[in-house]
Image (cartoon, rainbow, N blue to C red):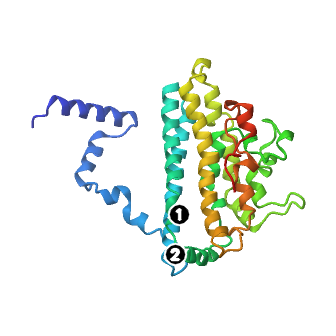
Amino acid sequence: MNLTDHSESILKEIDLKFQAINQKTEVQLEGLLWSKPITYWDYIQTDALLSLQTQRTTLPDEMVFIMYHQVNELIFKMILWEIDQIADTQNIQVAFFSERLSRITRYFDMLTNSFSIMENGMDVDQYMKFRNTLTPASGFQSAQYRLIEFASTDVINLTDRRYKENFNENTDLETSFEHLYWQAAGKDYQTGEKSYLLQEFEKKYKGQFLRQMSEFKTKNIWQKFTQLPIEDQQSPELIDAMRHYDKTVNITWVMQHLNTARKYILESGKGNGEATGGSDWQKYMHPKYQRRIFFPKLWAEEELSNWGNETTI
């Protein structure tokens, strides 16, 4: 049997690959004789993916609600995948940083632009009925979204603004966690009591959140930005990309979510104005109240003081 030079070159590279992990190349190659050719549906796991939509009611538009949120979670996973590449790259170069940040921002732009699916794609009567079966679950309980926040900025920037002046980068993680901005949606700071919504969320994810807070303390997006050479940190293109990401996540996307919730919960006249999880959702979500800002040093004082003020509730 005659092999082309290209085939021989590939076989040599394969042999070197398996030698490096102390494996016999001929065994690996023989295994290929019995392996099945890959198909699209096996590779994408289409059947498994399409089996994950389980309605709790008989109302058709509940399926829109379920699938849209599952799409959101898949996009969040893509965002975390890109953030990990930034975080785990040693001596990161500005071109690599900017390209990955652009990917992340495009994903959030996609999420922002897709909210018309929720805003205009469900019958109000159906939504107001099936949402009662979701209580006390809430989109507040998206763990991946919290992981994105921890991987994007220093924890101090996620602290409830009422307590921020008492905290710094040396505050222990447990104390910081108890004063994150989103704790206000499920915690009475006067009594210390937490809602069932928050208790269940923490029961499942608090350990993972604390690990993420610790792991990304020195390698979140902001920290990786500060590790670039000074001349790269002054790049107008990179600064614009950082600011766009910050505003998209913490104002534009949040407001799209808020306005969609308002349409169904308030403006329809068919709800009681309460979120399924019982949170004070308008003040929790609106950027002008909590002023979530990932990269405050990249904004002018006037921009910071007016954060979210151009949007209304």
Q: Which residue is mark 2?
A: 55
In the image, what residue type sits under mark 2?
Answer: Gln
Name the secondary structure under disc 2: loop
Instruction: Compare residues 268 and 111 and report the one nearer the observer.
Output: 268
Instruction: Compare residues 209 and 128 and report the one nearer the observer.
Output: 128
Instruction: Compare residues 78 and 302 and report the one nearer the observer.
Output: 302
Residue 274: x %, y % from top left: 72, 69
Q: Is residue 30 left or right of residue 305?
A: left
In the image, what residue type sits under mark 1?
Answer: Met
Picture residue at 41% right of the left edge, 66% below the top:
50
Residue 238, by quadrant, is top right
Q: Is residue 143 left or right of residue 94?
A: right
Rendered view: 39 above or below 168: below
Picture residue at 61% right of the left edge, 69% below the top:
264
For the view shown, which residue lies furthest in the left direction? 1
Picture residue at 51% right of the left edge, 59% below the top:
116
Picture residue at 53% right of the left edge, 63% below the top:
118
Rendered view: 60 above or below 165: below
Q: Earlier in the sequence, mark 2 or mark 1?
A: 2
Dot 1 surroundings within 10 Å: few (below 14), some, or many (20 or more)? some
Residue 101: x %, y % from top left: 53, 36
Residue 301: x %, y % from top left: 74, 32
Gap between marks 2 and 1 measured at Cα: 17 Å
For the view shown, which residue lies furthest in the right direction? 190
Q: Which mark is residue 118?
A: 1
Task: Please say if the residues under marks 2 and 1 sit with CB atoms less than 8 Å apart.
Answer: no
Name the secondary structure under disc 1: helix
The image quadrant where one finds the N terminus is top left
The image quadrant where one finds the C terminus is bottom right
